[in-house]
Amino acid sequence: MLGIFNYWLLWVLPLLAFTAMGFIIYALGEKKGKPAPGKYETYTCGEKFPVTDVGHENFYRPIKRILELSRLRHAHTGILSDYLLMIVTGFVIVLLFVMVLI
Amino acid sequence: MIGYIILILIVATFLSLIVRRDILPIGAIIISFLFLVFLAAGSGIVLFEFGGWEAPFGIVWAADKLSMMIAMLVTGIASLVAVYSLRYIKERRHRYYSLLSLMTIGMLGVSLTGDIFNLYVFFEIFSISSYALVAFFLDDYAIEGAFKYLVAGSFATTMLLLGIALLYGSAGTLNMADLSSQILQTPMFLVPLALLITGFGLKVAMVPFHFWKPDAIEGTPSPIGAIFTAVSTSIGIYCILRVLFIFSLIELNTLLIVFGVVTMVVGAVMAFMQDNIKRLLAYSSISQIGYILLALGLGTYLGISGGLYQLLNNAIANALLFLSIGVVILYSGGRERLSNLSVKNNILMFCFGIGALSIIGIPPLAGFASKYMIYLAAWEVSPPIAAISIIVAAFTLAYYLKAFSCVFLNPRGRTEIKGIPLIMLIPIIILAALCIILGILPHLGLYVVEPAVQALTNSSGYVAAVLGGG
Amino acid sequence: MIAETYITIVALIVLGIYCLVWKSNLVKKIIGLGIFAKAVHLLLITIGFRPGGIPPIVTPQNLQTFASLSVDPLPQALVLTSIVIDLSITALALSIAILAYRHFRTLNTKNIRRMRG
């Protein structure tokens, strides 16, 4: 069964790829050096905007929007009775499975 | 012989409440781990008859290689957590340690016993001490998590007792080996079987029963989170395997596959949307449990060994993640939100990265070896399931990338962690080293896993060994 | 006699699960849990019961007829164990309910939902 681990290419290639990616990112970061002061400040019609960055909750916002993933999150209401009802439902599902399969 | 492990642990637990020495429970857990390693090196099934009564009449402990593997995992992770907690828990430490040691007693008893009511009793010991540990900090989150877990958990264990009562009513015995030889697949056994799967499924945290886990983990101390994600799910899976394989109900494999795939997807999607680091890790562990259930449900030799190997690797990597994130939370003043949790420490960054990459399944690490076996086994049975599991691995990469970049790479409001005590660092480094070693040399892990797979698939050998008397 | 006991057990289990799932007060949930557990204990006792049976104590007089007359002693031992477990769960649950009331000033579980999603 250990034979499945003997494809050395499968091990070495991703390792090399990751190392190469790491070096490329590191080299690009080194070359640019530090940005001049004021480079990140935003000017709009002469007004100064405070520096903002994307919050963690917006990290994968498009994917969440498109796949409508938050619907699943709203199913976890945090109310104990709903959770206990989920146990009872799960029990009924398991019972049906057992009855069908055996 | 194995009964004395529990005796040592019980004495240490109650003595430590009186004399208030933390070294007693820690020493007892480490001694039991070494003792189990010594026992597991021997061959065959280790039997222990309580009071000298033989198998179908008295309570018998029967430890085959599967039980040994689970017991070693339990005591190994528990001893690392116990050493780590010396600096993590600042107050009421003797109570913490006696509860931790009581929880270890429960889990050891569950994994070693051969009697189904004895299994229920130890399961309850383990559950009650874990309810108390969830509430240990006594703040709002701890109390809310504790009562949700308590009510749901005791509902499930009462269902377990109902199932055992019905099983006793229809078979007239409580010894698991005897039950498996008496079991007839009549409608009388269907309801107890469903009750048992539901009762153990809550501890596994497979999908309709998974809600308690993030809530409980958000309230607990982080080392106990390591125990919850790494070990207590393994105990649940062990119980389900005992129920399904000892009663030779291989037909139920489809149930495991369906629950495994649903658990995998729902856990990954929910982890994708979390903004609390502990909840994210909790949902991630739920998603990993799905892989194990899927692999065990495939039923082929490759699948079962992949599943048990994934159980081992998942336990190591989850414990590593929780222990390293525990240091981060401790030193940044109890903050857990990804938006304001940001630290700078190279060792922690390296160890967390190793754990995360191992869970995702990136080649040189331990998680890859087991996940590769699972993908291959799933591809043989049905290619769409293999495709789903690879897509879920991509989701895993996505949310760990988010967690890693928010915690370790965010330059704003960063606290620099200096001078982590060595006693906290050693368990983390041991676990990270295990992740790397088991990845480069998968033979070492399979050396532990293969006897367990053979013990699991050879259930008639177990029955013969237990009923034949040892 | 036995049939009525089984009907009572089923009724108690349904009542316990109803109380556990649909009542939102934490103490009522604990009461429901207790009812459910007691119904299971009653079931265990009833499984071992035999109409007109004798107590499971062996004496020199009943040595011959013991096996055919006595009730099953094992479920009684199981029930004793599980009553102790049930007691400790109830005690822990009530103490956590007291703490929950101190922290949240309510026992309505519909309002204690700080952690969700």
Image (cartoon, coloured by chain):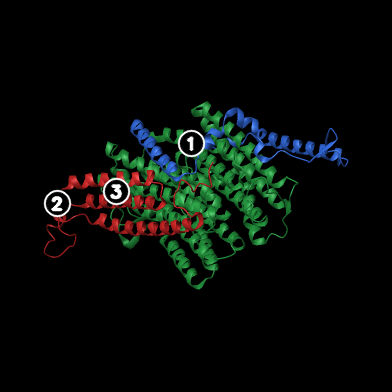
Chain colours: A blue, B green, C red
For the C terminus of chain C, which image quadrant?
top right
Q: Which residue lies at the image location 67% right of the left edge and 55% below the top edge?
A: B332
In the displayed structure, would residue B329 be above or below residue B31? above
Residue B104 seen:
no
Mark 2–mark 3 Cα distance, whole angstroms, equals: 19 Å
The answer for which chain carries disc 1 is: B
Mark 2 and 3 residues: CB-CB less than 8 Å, in contact?
Answer: no
Give the residue at mark 2.
C51
* Occupied quadrant, residue B396: top right
Asked if marks 2 and 3 fall on the same chain, the answer is: no
Mark 3 surroundings: few (<14), some (14-19) or many (≥20) residues within 10 A: many
Could you tell me the amino acid type at mark 2? Pro
Could you tell me the amino acid type at mark 3? Ala
Mark 3–mark 1 Cα distance, whole angstroms, equals: 28 Å
* Occupied quadrant, residue A73: top right
Q: Nearer the viewer, residue B418 or C96?
A: C96
The answer for which chain carries disc 3 is: B
Give the residue at mark 3.
B165
The answer for which chain carries disc 2 is: C
Residue C104 seen:
yes
Give the residue at mark 1.
B260
Q: Mark 3 or mark 1: which comes first in sequence? A: 3
Residue B23 x, y percent position in the rendering: 55, 68
Q: Name the secondary structure under disc 2.
A: loop
Could you tell me the amino acid type at mark 1? Gly
Q: Nearer the viewer, residue A80 or B426?
A: A80
Asked if marks 1 and 2 fall on the same chain, the answer is: no
